[in-house]
C-alpha cells in the first residue's frame, strides 16, 4: 500500500485524494496552514496547489521532499490573458520544480484532468486517463499503480521533458472550457 | 458548396479528401508532380504534406495561394529523436507558414487527427473532432462547416497562436502511438 501526502485541499486535491483512497492508498491531506506544522508522511507527495505556490513550497520544504516522488499538477497559465503560459517556452513548471528539488523524483500528472473527471472516473462515457511524465521509471510505476487501483487509467507519457506537451494540452483544454467549447466534465479522453 | 484543393495524396490527404467530399465539397487533389502544371482551384487549400515541404510550396506557389485559406496539417517533429519539435519553442509550423504567406489566411487543422480516425469518423466510439486554430474567423467558419458536413465534429480552438498547443498535442499523440500506448485508430477524443 502506498502512502501519499496531498498538499492542497481544493477541488483538485480533494479529487486526487478520492481516487487514491479508493485505490487503497493511505492519504495525508494537508492544507497550507497545517503544512507548516506537519511532517510530510507520503512516499509520494502531490502538490495540488496553483503554479505560483510551487517555488515557496520547494524553498520551505525541500529538505522534507528530498528523495520523495513529488507530483506537479499545475497548469502555469497567464490568467490575466488566458493566452499563454508563464514558464519558459522551452521549459515547463515540472522542469522548474525538478531544478529546485534536485534530489526529488518529480512527476507531471493530473494537469490534463479536470477535477470532476477524476471524481467521476469518466470523461463522458470514457474512463478518465491520467497522463504521467517523469524521468524516474520506478516513481512513475508507483503512481500509475496507485491511480489504476483507484479505477482510472494511467499512462506513462514519457520523460519529464514531455511535461511541456502535457502543460500545452492542459492549457488548450482550459481554453476550450473557458470558451465553452467543452464542459468542465468533458475534455480530452485518451482512446487506446 | 466549397471547393477545396488538397496538395498531397498520402494517407492524410486522401482521408481529408474523403471527409470533405462526403460533406459535398468539390475536391481537387494534387500530388507533387501534378502541382507544378496545375492551377490551384480551391478557395481552401489543404497542404497535406510533411513539414519540410511547406517552405518550398510557399516559395513556389505563394502567388496562387494569396488571398486563399491555407490549411497547415503538419506535425513538425524531429523524427531522428522523436523527442522534440523542429520549430522555435515559442512558434509553430503554422506561424512560420503564415509569415511566409502573409496575404493568405492560414489555419492549423487536422494535425491532431490520425488518418484512420478521419476515414472512420470515429476515435474508438467517439465522433472524431477536428481542432482548428486561426486568426481569420470567416476562414475558420468555412472549414468548420465543410468538416461538419462530412460528419465529423469541428471545433474552433482559438487564434493561430494556439497552433503551438495543437502541435504539442499532435506531437504527444504521435509519441503515445509510437510507444504503443495507443493505436493508430485511437488518440485523443474531445468530449463536450
Image: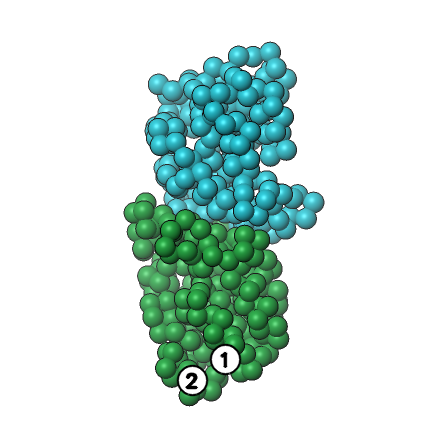
Chain colours: A cyan, B green
Query: Label for residue B60?
Result: 1
The residue marked by circle 2 belongs to what chain?
B
Q: Secondary structure at mark 2?
A: helix
Instruction: Find residue B107 and report its horizontal and vertical position in percent.
Output: 54, 66
Q: Residue at x 37, y 78 (%)?
A: B31
Q: Residues within 10 Å of mark 1 (few under 14, many from 20)?
A: few
Using the image, determine if residue B34 lies above or below residue B53: below
Q: Are marks 1 and 2 in contact (CB under 8 Å)?
A: yes
The chain letter under disc 1 is: B
Q: Residue at x 57, y 48 (%)?
A: A89
Instruction: Decide which of B28, A187 is in the foreground and name it.
Output: B28
| Location of residue B52 with respect to B40 vertically, above or below | above
Q: Residue at x 55, y 61 (%)?
A: B133
Q: Which residue is mark 2?
A: B36
Residue B73 appearing in the image: yes
Residue A110, percent from left and from top: 47, 36
Residue at screen point 39% across, 41% down: A158
Q: Residues within 10 Å of mark 2 (few under 14, many from 20)?
A: few
For this rendering, which residue is in front, A121 or A188?
Answer: A188
- Return the mark for residue B142: none
Q: Is residue B67 left or right of residue B153?
A: right
Amino acid at each position: 500500500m502506498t502512502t501519499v501526502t496531498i498538499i492542497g485541499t481544493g477541488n483538485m486535491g480533494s479529487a486526487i485524494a478520492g481516487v487514491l483512497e479508493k485505490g487503497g492508498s493511505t492519504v495525508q491531506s494537508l492544507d497550507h496552514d497545517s503544512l507548516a506544522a506537519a511532517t510530510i508522511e507520503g512516499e509520494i507527495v502531490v502538490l495540488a496547489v496553483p503554479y505560483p505556490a510551487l517555488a515557496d513550497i520547494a524553498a520551505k520544504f525541500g529538505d522534507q521532499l528530498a528523495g520523495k516522488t513529488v507530483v506537479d499538477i499545475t497548469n502555469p497559465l497567464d490568467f490575466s490573458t488566458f493566452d499563454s503560459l508563464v514558464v519558459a517556452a522551452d521549459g515547463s513548471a515540472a522542469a522548474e520544480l525538478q531544478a529546485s528539488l534536485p534530489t526529488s523524483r518529480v512527476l507531471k500528472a493530473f494537469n490534463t484532468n479536470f477535477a470532476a473527471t477524476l471524481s467521476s472516473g469518466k470523461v463522458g462515457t470514457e474512463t478518465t486517463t491520467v497522463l504521467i511524465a517523469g524521468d524516474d521509471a520506478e516513481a512513475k510505476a508507483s503512481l500509475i499503480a496507485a491511480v489504476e487501483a483507484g479505477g482510472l487509467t494511467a499512462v506513462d507519457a514519457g520523460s519529464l521533458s514531455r511535461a511541456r506537451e502535457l502543460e500545452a494540452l492542459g492549457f488548450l483544454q482550459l481554453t476550450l472550457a473557458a470558451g465553452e467549447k467543452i464542459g468542465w466534465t468533458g475534455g480530452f479522453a485518451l482512446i487506446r
